[in-house]
Amino acid sequence: MTFAQFCQNLGDPKVYYPQLAAATGGVVAAIVAWHILQQQGDRTPNWIRLNEQDITAQTGLTETEQQLARQQLAQKGLLEERPVSGREGVVDVRLNLEKLEDALQSGETPASAAPADPYFPAKRQAIATVVTPNYQFSGPWNSPEQLEAFQRQLLDYAKQKGLDNPSGWMFKIVDGLTKGMISPFWDEFTENRPLGSSQQVKRDWEIETGVPYPAFEEERIQYYVQKGEPLEVAVSRARADLRKPVLAQDLWEGFLRKCDRLADEAIKAKKKGLTTPYLPPSFTQRSEITKEQVMEKLLQVSTPTALPESEPPPEPDAPPSLEQLQKAYQSPLGRSWVKQQLQQHPEWGYEIIDNQVQPSLPF
């Protein structure tokens, strides 16, 4: 294919004037301005009607490009517009020929075409909104100190609850307050109440918020124990079930039915002369197990209770021998017990020197 044949396939060419582009602010604006000039001519009044689809067919400019070009011409005072009601994509326009002629004679060039200074390059336009140095969150707090105190309480609350990202959770609460959101945490903070206290609900199966009745909890623990779960797993699963309101409510209703049945059976048994009717293990009163009690038992197990046969047993109130203490100090639990006993009984005459139990040094 020859060059002439290629050009024939492109259709009719359109005129483009570089001087008009400099006056209007760009090539696209110049094409739209020249199209309007051809249609407007010297007619009076100079208003003409443009159809964006027709201009696209004649110039190849999209509707968006046409609208931006008309806005650019209007900002320079070269174009006036008035909408046509009921017709989308159709507008009446008029070029201000006097201002356009003045722009052509003055040789005005667009800002983007300004010659570049090799020593002082053009300043780059900012791509982000400038924030003042003293910018602060705007919210219901009266001072930055009050906001800081509120944030610290939020962080402590998030840590106690075991949240994965305490700082991120805290930011969401504070950011919501800046946008006018209501937060019960702020109300609790201003009223000097523990955070989260107003959001806690005491359920029917709880003796206090978050603490279920011991018999109800033990009943659920025994359910998992009977299914073959280890005790520690049974406790964990039972407490997880009772933290789910819907599931716990259903379990509570079943538990009450069971209690009512057991009470009826106990009343019948008493009427027949039985003094102590049977109750399931979950209804047996059990003392709470504490860490101190467990540690004391474990220390008793790890501490030697018998002496070698060659040595006579000490008196009940006699202090342990140095060998006994040194042997007990070798295990982690025994080490803790020995340290505690030596602090409570300095009269024994022993102390820990270089991580070993040795007789106390004289002063």
Image (spheres, rainbow, N blue to C red):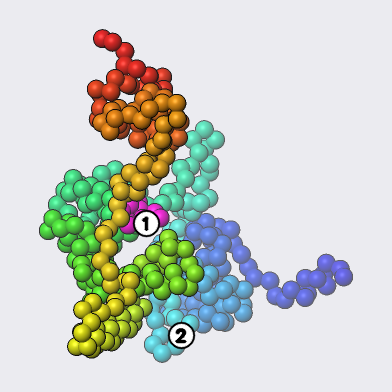
Q: What residue type is labelled 1?
A: Leu
Image quarter where the C terminus lies is top left
Q: Say which amino acid is labelled 2.
A: Glu
Neighbourhood count class around disc 1 (C-alpha, 10 Å): few under 14, some 14–19, many 20 upward: few
**48 or 315, which lies in front?**
315
Q: Residue at x 27, y 63 (%)?
A: 286
Q: Quadrant of residue 347?
A: top left
- In the rendering, at what x and y percent does residue 57 appear? 62, 79
Q: What stretch is highlighted in magenta?
A: 158-168
Picture quarter containing residue 99?
A: bottom left
- Name which quarter of the figure residue 177 lies in: bottom left
Helix, strand or loop for disc 2: loop
Badge 2 is on which residue? 88
Report if residue 33 is visible in the image. Answer: no
Q: In this view, does 248 lie above or below 108?
A: below
Q: Residue at x 56, y 62 (%)?
A: 27
| Residue occupied by mark 1 | 163
Q: Which residue is drawn at 41% across and 90% down?
A: 86
Which of the image's four quarters has the N terminus? Answer: bottom right
**Dot placed on the residue nearer the N-terminal end, 2 or 1:** 2
Q: How many other residues sit within 10 Å of disc 2, few (<14), some (14-19) or many (≥20)?
A: few
Outermost residue to the left:
191
Front position among marks 2 and 1: 1
In percent of width and height, residue 186 lies at 20, 59
